[in-house]
Image (tube, helix red, strand yellow):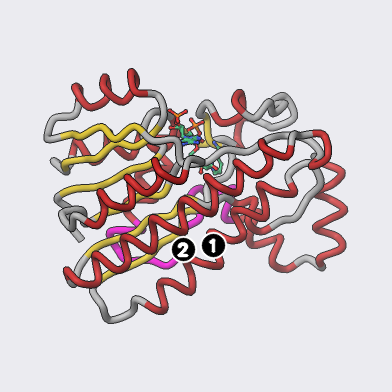
Amino acid sequence: MVWTKALVTGASSGIGLSIVRELGRRGVAVVLVARDIDRLNTIANEHPVAAEVLQADLTNTEQLAAVEQRIEVGDIDLVVNNAGFGLDGMFIDHTRDDETNMVLVNVVALHRLSHAAAITMKTAGTGSILNIASVAAFTSTARASTYSATKAFVVSFTDALASELKGTGVTATSLCPGLTRTEFHDRGDYDLDKFPDFAWQTSDEVALQGLHAAANGERRRIPGAVNKAMVGVIKTMPETLIRAVGNRFF
Ligand SMILES: NC(=O)c1ccc[n+]([C@@H]2O[C@H](COP(=O)([O-])OP(=O)(O)OC[C@H]3O[C@@H](n4cnc5c(N)ncnc54)[C@H](OP(=O)(O)O)[C@@H]3O)[C@@H](O)[C@H]2O)c1
């Protein structure tokens, strides 16, 4: 699949920014969505082809609706639902609003924008939806209860959406990164010291894998040998053992 215009949420940093830069190298126009307008304007100015800025807080219903309407214009053939965040720590130690906002950004926004994209692209007979999940989708560990659940939703939903879209010219792909060097861990107050260097990927590596999988119309991609091996092992382990190891680690 060769795209002409992509809408990327969470385009202001990390994996989303790496995706935008790779799209720029491929000559793809972009619509950049995030809250930080200064960063988005700088990124748009650097983009080698057309770039629009659409400032939106995806926890806000009206601002999310504006992004849905932008997709419904019908000129976008790649939607990347990348915006997301996690919070290290116990469910009851976070505010109710912080926990709810995680669901609003990681699940509700992705869900509504996938709906807008699937309908609009199906009418056009072509398009790709790339939803950013996480290896956390495959575990349910303490200190990551809501985050893991949001990412499990992304994988499960995207798998089924891919089936529903079969034969329409539209594909849905989930990307499940593991540890990736971005602003994610600072924002979520994660302790990084316990994670060995070999477990990390760069956002550029992850972005390339995601775009490759979406271009091929793959249902799901786990980038990186370490992440692939980890998910492979998790799938062969009894649930109680996965939980015990995960809870001990986190
Ligand atoms: N880094 C990792 O280790 C890792 C691993 C697995 C999966 N992931 C997933 O990868 C995706 C990208 O994260 P990242 O690692 O690149 O982290 P990041 O550098 O913190 O980027 C997160 C992006 O999401 C945007 N965002 C957050 N809340 C938003 C809101 N309310 N409204 C609109 N945009 C919002 C941020 O933009 P503004 O602040 O400008 O709004 C930013 O552009 C996320 O879905 C994350 O769950 C990350």
Amino acid type shown at disc 1: Val
Mark closest to the chain's N terminus, 2 or 1: 1
The percent coordinates of residue 70 (x first, y second) are: 25, 48
Amino acid type shown at disc 2: Arg
Vertical position of residue 60 compared to residue 148: above or below: above
| Residues drawn in magenta | 213-228
Q: Are marks 2 and 1 in contact (CB under 8 Å)?
A: yes
Q: Is residue 219 magenta?
A: yes
Vertical position of residue 231 compared to residue 31: above or below: below
The residue at the point 46 percent across, 46 percent down is 61
Q: Provide the residue designation for mark 1.
A: 155
The percent coordinates of residue 211 (x first, y second) are: 32, 51
Report whether 190 appears left or right of 116: right
For label 1, the crowd category at 10 Å Cα-Cα, with few meaning under 14, some 14 to 19 and many 20 or more, is many
Alpha carbon distance from label 2 to label 1: 8 Å
Report whether 103 appears left or right of 10: right
Q: Provide the residue designation for mark 2.
A: 220
